[in-house]
Amino acid sequence: MNGGDQPLVSVVTPFYNTDRYLAQCIESVLGQTYENWEYLLLNNCSTDRSREIAQTYAQRETRIRLVDNESLLGQVPNYNRALGQISERSRYCKMVQADDWLFPECLAEMVSVAEANPSVGIVSSYYLNGTKVLGSGLPYPSTTVVGSEICRWHLLFFPERYLFGTPTTLLFRSDLVRSRIPFYEETSLLEDYEACFELLKESDFGFVHKVLTFSRVEEGSLTGQIRNFHPYLLHAFICLMKYGPLYLDREQYHKTFGLIRKRYLEALAKGVVNRLGGEFWQYHASGLRSVGYEFSRIELAIYVVLELLDVFRHPKAAVRLLAKSFDFRTPPET
């Protein structure tokens, strides 16, 4: 397809104080081999040089539009506002988070799959997450999967296999985005995952067997901060409770629920033994409350005892655990 034959793609980047990476993100959109796109840059009241950087590009390229929020929004409301600004003429929509970027063939490859398969509502691909390539699991050369089937697959094998990636990984049909504004559920802990489960009730899933996007892994980011909290087991548990009855048969649901529940209790028990503290428990309590679930304290205590027994069967692990009980950085009081 040449530029005149290509359907319009709305690319959106909501940003807040990301001057360190924003230019690289914008350059990756400018560098696309696909030509028919509009690019919305939404400034969420940045206090660094981010707006200045975005304005420089908007003045240079007519396909870029810079919009400013009047007041500071939370991340998900900000993403929703950006998606609500896409053109009525666009056929596809692509989020690019401000500290991520796209490989040059990204839009061309994703649009090609979507155009060849009108039932596809979401297109994904392999993605570079820091230094790791993720998104594997779909057999090559499969490019389309029935929506209900890919949801069932995720529920049965998540978190070991996961094709939805990050918001930067996915291309959506714009009519599906416009049909559910606000696009992301703002009270959800897993707003991006849940949007996929919802859209795939009525559409199919497309996949490109290439690495097309890059997602940055930062220690100071929210994802980096909760990495030791076993977030993916909580996510698997929440998704299973909300969508298991919809996409799994009764036997699959109960079997998978039992396995995930056991693994999750084991992870919580490790949190107790390793003294992960209040933030760990607040994070999990908040997630469980979102689906109206609470573990029995007696049952959790049993798993803690089992974890302790396992630790003390391994002397090195026991010594490391005991060492955590002492804060060697703090001098004794005199």
Image (cartoon, helix red, strand yellow):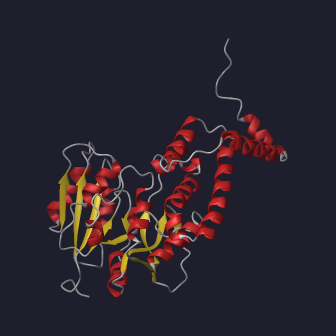
Question: In the rendered image, which quarter contains the N terminus?
Answer: bottom left
**How many circles with numbers are drawn on the protein?**
0
Question: Residue 24, how many percent across, how many down?
Answer: 33, 61
In this view, the residue farthest toward the top is 334
In this rendering, position of residue 22 left or right of residue 329: left
Give the image quarter of residue 202: bottom left
Question: Residue 7, how many percent across, how many down?
Answer: 23, 80
Q: Quick check: 226 above or below 252?
A: above
In this view, the residue farthest toward the front is 250
Question: Residue 266, how many percent across, how many down?
Answer: 69, 50
In this rendering, position of residue 296 left or right of residue 24: right
Question: In the rendered image, which quarter contains the C terminus?
Answer: top right
Q: Is residue 248 visible?
A: yes
Asked whether 216 or 166 is in front, the reply is 166
Asked whether 235 or 2 is in front, the reply is 235
Write the residue at 78% across / 46% down.
Answer: 306
Question: Residue 269, how many percent across, how many down?
Answer: 68, 45
Q: Quick check: 104 above or below 274?
A: below
Write the residue at 60% across / 68% down.
Answer: 250
Asked whether 295 or 306 is in front, the reply is 295
In this rendering, position of residue 2 left or right of residue 263: left
Asked whether 163 or 219 is in front, the reply is 163
Q: Is residue 135 visible?
A: no
Write the residue at 83% across / 47% down.
Answer: 314
